[in-house]
Image (cartoon, grey):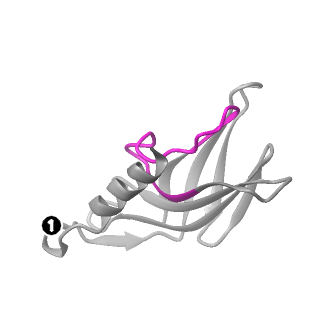
Amino acid sequence: MIRLAAFALGLVLAGPLGAQEPTARGSGAVLRALDKITTELRDLELPNGGVGEFGALTVELGECRYPEENPAGDAYAYLVIRNALTAQVLFSGWMLASSPALNALEHPRYDVWVLRCTT
């Protein structure tokens, strides 16, 4: 199921060049993380290539992109999320701010989603 969603997202992002909206690369991203057990909610502001920690997660931001004509528009970010203790990859791929469930971290305790790019 995850691979199917990632494949579908890849098709959307890699669609015909003429139909794509021009994008710009942000300098980083603001992510929101939730611990579903303790209800801790925290925003992580990461630069491109930066790493942050939340609970037992390590979150790495590859890059963040947004519509060139609308910096406040729909951002999408490439994330790698690992278990901080075992380094096991729990999520790797593009996550969209407007549709976090389309390609989401599936974890019983934590949620992480993209809010916006930083410019």
Does the magenta-highlighted stretch encompass residue 24? Answer: no
Magenta residues (range): 92-112
Residue 30 location in percent, x, y?
Answer: 57, 53
Report the magenta stretch's main SS.
loop
Q: Is residue 40 above or below residue 74?
A: above
Residue 85 location in percent, x, y?
Answer: 86, 53
Q: Secondary structure at mark 1?
A: helix
Classify residue 23 by image quadrant.
Answer: bottom left
Q: Which quadrant of the rendered structure holds the N terminus?
A: top left
Give the camera-side residue of 36 and 64: 36
Q: How many marks?
A: 1
Classify residue 48 by image quadrant.
Answer: bottom right
Task: Using residue 113 as the reference point, say whether residue 96 is left or right of it.
Answer: left
Give the camera-side residue of 100 and 88: 88
What residue is shown with label 1?
A: 19
Give the residue at x 19% y 74%.
17
Q: Given the image, on which type of amino acid does mark 1 rest?
A: Ala
Disc 1 packing (10 Å; few <14; some 14–19; many ≥20) = few
